[in-house]
Amino acid sequence: MDPVSQFPLVFHDQQAVVDLDPQALATKLAQHFPVEDFAPRNPLLNPFRHRASTAVAGDLTLTSGYTSPIHGCIGDNPGVGAINICYQGKSSYGVDGNTFHIHAEAPLYFNPGFSYNYTTGHYNGLVLHVDLQRLQDTAAAIGGMGLSGRRFVPDLQRPQVLSMTEDRQSTLLITMRRAFALLDAPELQARGDLAALQIDDLIYRILAMALCPQLDGGQGKGLSRELIFEELLEWIGANLQSPINLTQLEQRSGYSRRNLQLAFSQRFGCGPIQWIRRQRLGLARQHLLNPSPCDSVAGISLKLGFSNLSSFSRDFHNTYGIRPSEMLREGRRLHG
């Protein structure tokens, strides 16, 4: 049986364009993204054939296609994420020494603009490219509470494969396939209703939820403000001995600077930097009361991130009503 007949396309199957010349197709593809290599595998055993159709949803262009076995390389594409979804067959992707496989049980490969090699068998799937900044902003909007897209950069700047064996990912992948099916509705297209449905927004939201596991905590209500804040406090506690600034707190939490100030003020009655200083003073007090033989006031203050000894001594005295040198002596007496 002709393998092409086994692979109906995801949408616009009757409007598909057939390419039999791999080099001509490579030239065509290179107009849209950085194709560095594109060639058939075992052309004597598998004559090259590529059959594809295209649909547009807002700013997204989606290509549904069947291809005979091929291999190739896509170059760096900064700011643009590649989404490859397998419907039938299988494909492998190599990036930075790692290999990712997609097939029926693990159908989606996400690449955040990195150069990658690929190899396919007889393959039927769908390809689209997304704006990574828009994807980050979408994740932040779902998270809510003034979050910045920067919180989701770690998830959206690493290659991933999404699996049908994980319940939540499976549900989202099935929902996205239903969204793709809406693109094959000529009656909606003819009346202009397809654009009004904003299917591109739906696709972005599904992708953000599927690629960012932390969005699984809110049951549709976004991330928990309490959870985000507690995670930030835990991180601060683990890093009190290193310099911490507002930019780091913004990046770590995803909060804007204004929302950070508001959150700390509501919880502790002071700003984040003032609160961190209080925590360092408390930790310094513990060190002074439980000194090691070689400890000194200057050494403890420096170890806890206080760059100015006189400022540390003044703040410590104002907070605890005793000079750090006196508390160190008391600590030595208690443990002498």
Image (cartoon, rainbow, N blue to C red):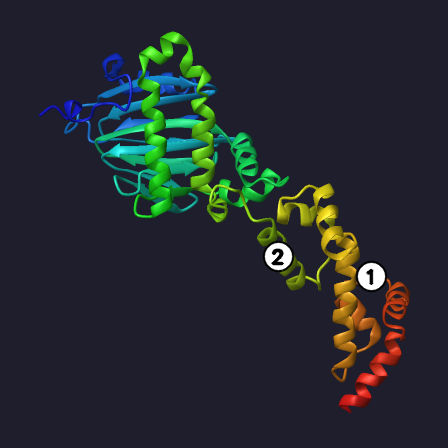
* Mark 2 or mark 1, whichever is nearer to me: 2
Report which quarter residue 304 is drawn in: bottom right
Relative to 331, is 39 above or below?
Answer: above
- Left/right placement of residue 296 relative to residue 182 reads right
In depth, the one of 198 and 323 nearer the eye is 198
Picture coordinates of residue 51, whole percent (x, y): 25, 19
Q: Quadrant of residue 288?
A: bottom right
Q: Nearer the viewer, residue 58 or 230?
A: 230
Residue most toward the top? 190
Mark 2–mark 1 distance (CA, rounded to whole Å):
27 Å
**Which amino acid type is shown beneath numbered disc 2?**
Glu
Lower position in the chain sequence, tag 2 or tag 1? 2
Tag 2, which secondary structure? helix
- The residue lying furthest to the bottom in this view is 336
Q: x, y (%) of residue 11?
A: 29, 20
- Quadrant hosting residue 210: top left
Query: How many neighbours does mark 1 have within 10 angstroms: few (below 14), some (14-19), or many (20 or more)?
Result: few
Q: Is residue 183 above or below residue 155?
A: above
Binning the other alpha carbons within 10 Å of mark 2 as few (below 14), some (14 to 19) or many (20 upward) gives few
Q: Quadrant of the C terminus?
A: bottom right
Q: Residue 231: percent from the left, percent from the top?
A: 60, 56
Seen from the viewer's position, the closer of residues 319 and 289 is 319
- The secondary structure type at the circle numbered 1 is loop
In the image, which disc is placed on residue 230? 2
- Tag on residue 307? 1
**Residue type, mark 1 in image:** Ser
Q: Is residue 42 above or below residue 260?
A: above
Give percent across and percent down for residue 31: 43, 17
